[in-house]
Amino acid sequence: MEKYKDKKQYRYKGYDYSKDGLYFVTICTKDRELYFGDIVNEKMQLSKIGRAAERFWLEIPRHFPFVGLDEFIIMPNHIHGIIKIENVGTQNVGTQNFVFLQEGYQNKLGPQSKNLSSIIRGFKIGVKKFCTSNNIVFAWQARFYDRIIRNEKELNNIRQYIINNPLKWELNRNHAANLFM
């Protein structure tokens, strides 16, 4: 775990991301490459990769039965979505990270299954495998942005932000800071 020693942690320190709740996420392509399609007349037109990303996004609850999906949008170089985690403690969903099952092992980053990071990691792996198996050049940005949604007003504001994202594409497309509200 030495390789994580100096990495900046982007998650909310001390927060358990497997807790029931709503999370707003933004996942970007590497170097903001326009892999997922383009905005035409203020509407998103998905490319082959964009259609695959949409399919894999919608399949998240099949792989993570404790997850519900809310509003989302696939943009040319990023994805915004709201993920709902509920009833985690009653599910029996595992990952391929068997090392975490070893007795006495403590991951300094916290549990790495049944949480927001494992959901996003699984989604990103699915899209990348699709591209690799179809000989399509594609890469993700290493991390993702998240926000814990704290109340109904915030949820509704984020939903509107997601819905209106294609309308603001021309204003925001070259401003990476604007990808996160």
Image (cartoon, rainbow, N blue to C red):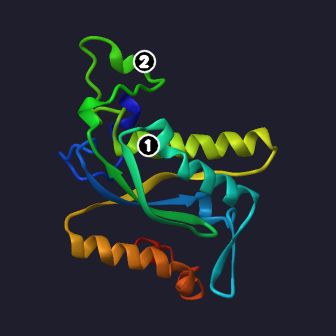
Left or right: 151 as drawn, with respect to 144: left
Quadrant of the drawing holding the C terminus: bottom left
In this view of the protein, which residue sits in the foreground, 179 or 163?
163
Point out the tag, 2 or 1, that comes first from the N-terminus. Answer: 2
User: Can see residue 9?
Assistant: no
- The circle on residue 98 is 2
Specify whether 141 is left or right of 156: right
Residue sitting nearer the eye, 5 or 110 = 110
Task: Determine which of the numbered discs, if any, sits on residue 140 in the image.
Answer: none
Q: Does dot 2 land on a helix, a strand or a loop?
A: helix
Report how far apart the C-alphas of labels 2 and 1 lie in the structure.
16 Å
Is 172 left, or right, of 158 in this rendering? right
Amino acid type at mark 2: Phe
Q: Quadrant of residue 144?
A: bottom left
Circle 1 residues within 10 Å: few <14, some 14–19, many ≥20: many
Label 1: which secondary element:
helix
| Position in image of residue 34 (x %, y %) | 68, 67
In the displayed image of the protein, which residue is found farthest to the right? 135
User: Could you tell me the amino acid type at mark 1?
Assistant: Ile
Work out whether 143 lies above or below 104: below
Quarter holding residue 161: bottom left
Residue occupying the point 23% across, 44% down:
19
Of 55 and 174, the residue lying toward us: 55
In the rendered structure, find residue 119 and report the number of the disc placed on it.
Answer: 1
Q: Looking at the picture, how far across and down is residue 56, in whole percent? A: 59, 48
Depth order, front residue of 120/154: 154
Spot occupied by residue 45 in the image (x, y as percentages of width and height): 70, 73
The residue located at (68%, 88%) in the rendering is: 41
Image position of 108 with respect to 121: above or below: above
Q: Position of residue 7 (x, y in %)?
A: 36, 45
